Amino acid sequence: MTRTLRLAASALCAALALGACHTLEVTDLNNPGLESLESNPTPVGLNTAATGLLIGLRVGIAEPNGWITILGALGREGFNLYTTSDPRYISELILGPLNPGSGAFGANFWAARYANIRNSFIVLNAADKVVGMTDPQKEGLRGFAKTIQALELLRVIVTRDANGAVVDTDRDPSGDPGPIVSKADVYTRIENLLDEGRTHLQAAGSAFSFPLGQGFTGFDTPATFLKVNRAIRAREAVYNNKFSDALTALGQSFLDTGAPLSLGVYHVYGTASGDLANNILEGTPVIRANPLLVSSAQLRVGGAPDKRVTDKIETGDDGTGSSGTTSITSNQHFKIYKTNTTPVAIIRNEELILLRAEAYLGSNNLPLALADINFIRINSGGLPAYSGPVTAAALLDELLYNKRYSLLWEGGNSWIDYRHYGKLTSLPRMVTNGKFFTKMPFPNNECLARSDASTQPGCSPEAGQ
């Protein structure tokens, strides 16, 4: 983690320098330096750094080789077919192996995630030193920073899975990296962070001392942000098969079948100088939906496809990507992100309802699981109520179908969910020699910093199945 921790310093400085970013509604606060934040933090500098965690959180999400496109390809949701620029979109993500390499493809989602985790520690440590803030304001900073840290660590472990990850990161960047620990240990750390964050938020008074911006409208006070903390806790618990914990957390989240399915928190983007745009629009790169999403969709009464298909995908010009003699062609275009300022969901109501269905199913409460599945089928898909066999196996397949279409091209959900249940190979391979991968390797620089790299499975290419 040595190089990653060094990157964190520059990343936080960059976040602080984005003080004029209009989408996060932060004014220019004289760009406090990292050194002063660590040694003599001021309320102004600390509040700016806290908001900067949201800037770090969106890094690498809506990029041509970002979270949505890479995990979307691994889960066969869609593809970046601009392979004249870089054939790895097919040669690595579809054919394999996933390579530790540069950290841009198979070993992505490590350095930036840990940089923001390091930044959250800087905020937490500064909150213990700052003078001129009330105790509730400091508790708000702590609850917010621990929630963001947990979300970033969850992103690390869902990509590395059985390879494990690092949780001991609040250490001297010039020293040895923290040890790689097991998947179970990482999930325990995430749970503790979120539960500690809840306690801080409950003591944080009525308002944060810093702005959260447009992406958190309606969730920008300690009490309402606590619902986001619980939503992330529910996601983590479902991923970790702790279904009772998930149901408890969902009951404390913003899940609401009477609210819009879009209700939630979002990454926001802008085109102002120094801001970050949403870069996964149509055009170049050539991003296309998997055409089998259309042909495999269930039908509404009258024969039209699932409404989620017609809402999110449209037919257009062909795009083709090749690696050697292997190619993928699609004329199905996503229409989810219409401009380069379109927000990207972090977590929203529709996912929470589906997570509740999943938690009920994992708890063997099939009637309640079916009720939530039908709610999404009818209200999001425009489909009739489910009429198949009411068995655990059949409802799991139906749940996975609905999660795939409801959360399409939003957060890599198909790859995460189908892997979770050992069903990756039920997805289309797209090409005869296509591979499915259950985990991503660590980036090369991480392995080079480790004396135990030879014993770490994550330091080897992932061959796939």
Image: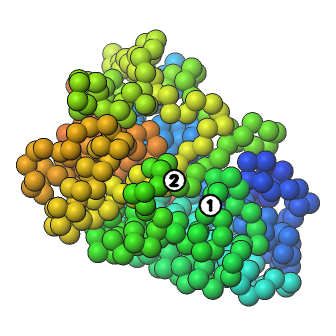
Q: Secondary structure at mark 2?
A: loop
Residue at horizontal 50 percent and vertical 28 percent from the top:
335
In percent of width and height, residue 89 lies at 45, 30
238 vs 299, nearest the viewer: 299
Q: Secondary structure at mark 1?
A: loop
Residue 255: percent from left, percent from top: 43, 62
Pick the quarter of the image with the N terminus.
bottom right
Quadrant of the rendering where the C terminus is positioned: top left
Q: Earlier in the sequence, mark 1 or mark 2?
A: 1
Residue 422 appears in the picture as rendered: no
Q: Residue at x 85, y 85 (%)?
A: 131
Q: Image point 76% across, 73% down: which residue? A: 209
Amino acid of disc 1: Gly
Disc 1 and disc 2 in contact, CB within 8 angstroms: yes
Question: Which residue is under mark 2?
Answer: 263
Q: Residue at x 46, y 68 (%)?
A: 253
Please determine whether, in this image, residue 231 is positioned above or below residue 215.
below
| Residues packed near mark 2 inside 10 Å, few (<14), some (14 to 19) or many (20 plus) | some
Which residue, given by chain and number where applicable, does mark 1 sit on? Answer: 218
Q: Quadrant of residue 122?
A: bottom right
**Residue 229 horizontal/vertical position (percent):** 52, 69
Task: Report whether 107 appears left or right of 460.
Answer: right
| Residue 298 numbered tag | none
Measured as percent of width and height from the top left, residue 353 is found at 36, 57
Q: CA distance from mark 1 to mark 2?
A: 9 Å
Q: Is residue 253 left or right of residue 359?
A: right
Name the residue type under label 2: Leu
